[in-house]
């Protein structure tokens, strides 16, 4: 394996079927890697937003529950409400874990793509990270 | 042109990849390849079955897989003595890598929690300052953070070193391109995040209201 960056028209990326031998193929591979990097940045922002949404919605629901409790003094209506909140929290956290797995896998894929030592692919990763950050991070401070 | 021909030969050999890998790895290990020696030293004394011995590139191309594969024959894992040869050993390695990835996620979240706990203790330094009319005023400075030699900071540093080492190990494991081990890394990370971040989110909920 060549241990330095090269400009080449041939590259084999990640899987056996992903081997390209022409400039058009390399350009398409760079585009795919770029979109993958944009997706990576988007997932990072998406996880934070999901957590924020879950916390705000669940804190609202627990405060509503407290208001109901003080008004009605009834313990029988508690349990379905509590279990519903817990179920929603569980689902939200499970979704976040899936997003985390996707983030880990895509991060490793990008590392392996850079390890191919093809300079065009490296540019695609760097540019994709930049574009992804540019597009996704303003969405973080929304709501 | 010549290098393209060599590469095409490699791609045909790659389909029988695990078998050929075994042959090379057997020779490679005896020459201490895992210690990072120069691969070209293997070329003169190694007899390549499919091409002439002058192709030193072919040995280097076959040493490290560059695409994902599923197999458990002759899989080198991180250290020179650790070679997986059977399905049972692969299952054990899968569990070990899974637990390592889970431990990594837990360590990340534990460090976050420790940092937050040690920074909640805000230190107030009161200093006497001369006032305008000759009176002495007490000026209080609020400092949030850690001293260099305090125990929390030293503990954070040690945990940081452990975290860096484990993250590089996980990267190297993923770099073996073995499908089973990569799935173990991803699943362990997901499970660890699920188990440890559950508690963290509850803690964040409580403390966020105070800030």
Image (tube, coloured by chain):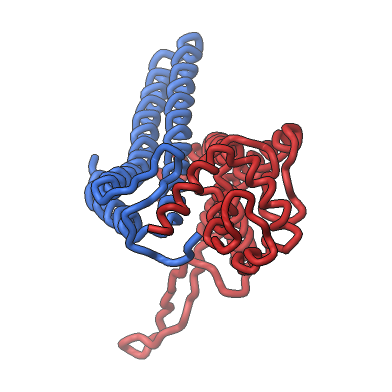
Where, by quadrant of the figure, is residue B152 drawn?
bottom right
Identify the residue at horizontal 46%, vertical 39% (top origin).
A16
Placement of B210 over or under A119, stated as above or below:
above
Identify the residue at horizontal 55%, vertical 47% (top origin).
B174
User: Which tint was used for chain A?
Assistant: blue
Q: Split into 4 quadrants, where in the image is the N terminus of chain B?
A: bottom left
Identify the residue at horizontal 41%, vertical 37% (top origin).
A17
Q: Residue furthest bottom?
A: B134
Please name whichever residue, A86 or B163, is drawn nearer the observer in this view of the structure: B163
User: Which tint was used for chain B?
Assistant: red
Placement of B93 over or under A27, stated as above or below:
above
Placement of B189 over or under B161, stated as above or below:
above
Left or right? Give the position of B7 relative to A125.
right
Residue B151's x, y, as percent? 65, 67
Q: Is residue A45 visible?
A: no
Residue B127's x, y, as percent? 47, 80
Where, by quadrant of the figure, is residue B185 drawn?
top right
Identify the residue at horizontal 48%, vertical 39% (top origin).
B201
Placement of B129 over or under B6, stated as above or below:
below
């Amino acid at each position: 394996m060549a241990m330095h960056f090269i400009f080449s028209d041939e590259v084999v990326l990640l899987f056996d079927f992903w081997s390209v031998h022409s400039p058009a193929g390399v350009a398409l591979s760079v585009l795919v890697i770029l979109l993958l990097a944009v997706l990576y940045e988007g997932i990072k922002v998406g996880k934070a937003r999901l957590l924020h949404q879950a916390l705000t919605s669940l804190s609202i629901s627990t405060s509503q529950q407290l208001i109901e409790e003080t008004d009605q003094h009834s313990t029988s209506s508690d349990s379905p409400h509590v279990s519903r909140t817990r179920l929603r929290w569980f689902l939200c956290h499970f979704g976040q874990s899936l997003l985390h797995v996707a983030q880990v896998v895509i991060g490793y894929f990008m590392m392996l793509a850079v390890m191919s030592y093809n300079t065009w692919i490296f540019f695609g990763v760097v540019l994709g990270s930049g574009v992804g950050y540019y597009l996704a991070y303003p969405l973080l401070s929304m709501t | 042109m010549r290098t393209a021909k060599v590469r095409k030969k490699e791609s045909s050999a790659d389909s029988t990849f695990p078998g050929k890998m075994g042959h090379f790895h057997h020779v490679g290990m005896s020459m201490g390849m895992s210690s990072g020696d120069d691969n070209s030293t293997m070329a003169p004394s190694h007899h390549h079955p499919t091409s002439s011995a002058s192709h030193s590139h072919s040995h280097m191309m076959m040493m490290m897989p560059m695409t994902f594969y599923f197999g458990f024959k002759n899989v080198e894992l991180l250290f020179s003595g650790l070679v997986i040869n059977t399905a049972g050993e692969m299952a054990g390695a899968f569990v070990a890598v899974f637990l390592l990835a889970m431990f990594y996620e837990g360590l990340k979240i534990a460090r976050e929690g420790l940092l937050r706990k040690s920074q909640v203790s805000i230190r107030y330094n009161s200093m006497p300052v001369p006032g305008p009319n000759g009176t002495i005023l007490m000026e209080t400075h609020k400092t949030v953070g850690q001293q260099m030699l305090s125990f929390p900071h030293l503990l954070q540093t040690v945990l940081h070193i452990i975290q860096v080492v484990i993250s590089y190990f996980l990267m190297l494991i993923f770099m073996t391109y073995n499908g089973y081990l990569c799935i173990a890394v991803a699943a362990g990370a997901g499970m660890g995040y699920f188990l440890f971040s559950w508690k963290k989110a509850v803690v964040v909920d409580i403390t966020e209201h105070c800030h």
